[in-house]
Image (cartoon, rainbow, N blue to C red):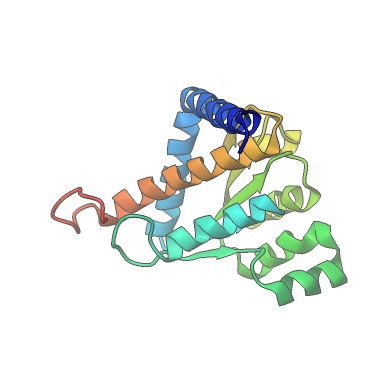
Amino acid sequence: MNHSGEGRVSESLVELSRLAATVADTAAEQIAEAGKLVWDSLSAGGKVLACGNGGSAADAQHFVAELVGRMGRERRALPAVSLSADSSVVTALTNDYGAENLFSRQIEALGQTGDVLLAISTSGHSPNVLRAVEVAHQRGLRTIALLGEDGDPSLSSCDVCIHVPCPNSQRVQELHMAALHAICDLVERQVTAGLLESDQALP
């Protein structure tokens, strides 16, 4: 690789580290609140529903995989569902009800009072994510929004909003995943409290 390529890689990583420091200063409290909200729901018998489009769909699926499986600590499986993962459901709902109802229809089927909806949108304006939050509120779910710089005003009604202040979608998605890992870590520590003899994470 030539020097200009190496320089661009270095620039990208430095940009990411600076943005991570900004998020640590501006959103650590909200991330901790999100972890508590998820834990409160799970400990009361609830579950997590997660949604997003494109890269945010991948982030939602990643987070669900960490909960159902494990991230760094051996513990019981935790109930979570990605609303973009079932191709038959996704294509049927998109075909029959339109993409804007893709997630909300599944929330009608699966969501119960006390569950948590994790809604991810780098733009904060995705119609199907906004509709999902609306229906989640109607059904008594708690809501967490992961956004970029801004979002639709309706998202201010979410229980927790985590903003990554950057216009670059790839940087936003990278920091969304860091936030999701932090939420999962907080939940895992709660699950394993009193169950492990030490606080040592599994290798």
Residue at the extreme front: 2
Residue 51 percent coordinates (x, y): 64, 56
- Using the image as rendered, state which of residue 64 and residue 161 is in the foreground: 64
Image-based side of 136 in relation to 28, left or right: right
Image-based side of 116 in relation to 2, left or right: left
Q: How many labels does the image show?
A: 0
Residue at the extreme bottom: 88
Say if 55 sits above or below 179 in the image: below
Residue 19 percent coordinates (x, y): 55, 26
The reply to whether residue 114 is visible in this rendering is no
Q: Quadrant of residue 147?
A: top right
Say if 30 sits above or below 116 in the image: above
Image-based side of 123 in relation to 182, left or right: right
- Using the image as rendered, state which of residue 153 and residue 95 is in the foreground: 95
| Residue at screen point 45% across, 59% down | 66
Image-based side of 35 in relation to 56, left or right: left
Q: In which quarter of the image is residue 13?
A: top right
Residue 123 percent coordinates (x, y): 74, 38
Residue at the extreme left: 197
Q: Quadrant of the N terminus?
A: top right
Q: Quadrant of the C terminus?
A: bottom left
| Residue at screen point 51% across, 55% down | 63
| Residue at screen point 86% across, 72% down | 96
- Using the image as rendered, state which of residue 145 and residue 59 is in the foreground: 59
The reply to whether residue 178 is visible in this rendering is yes
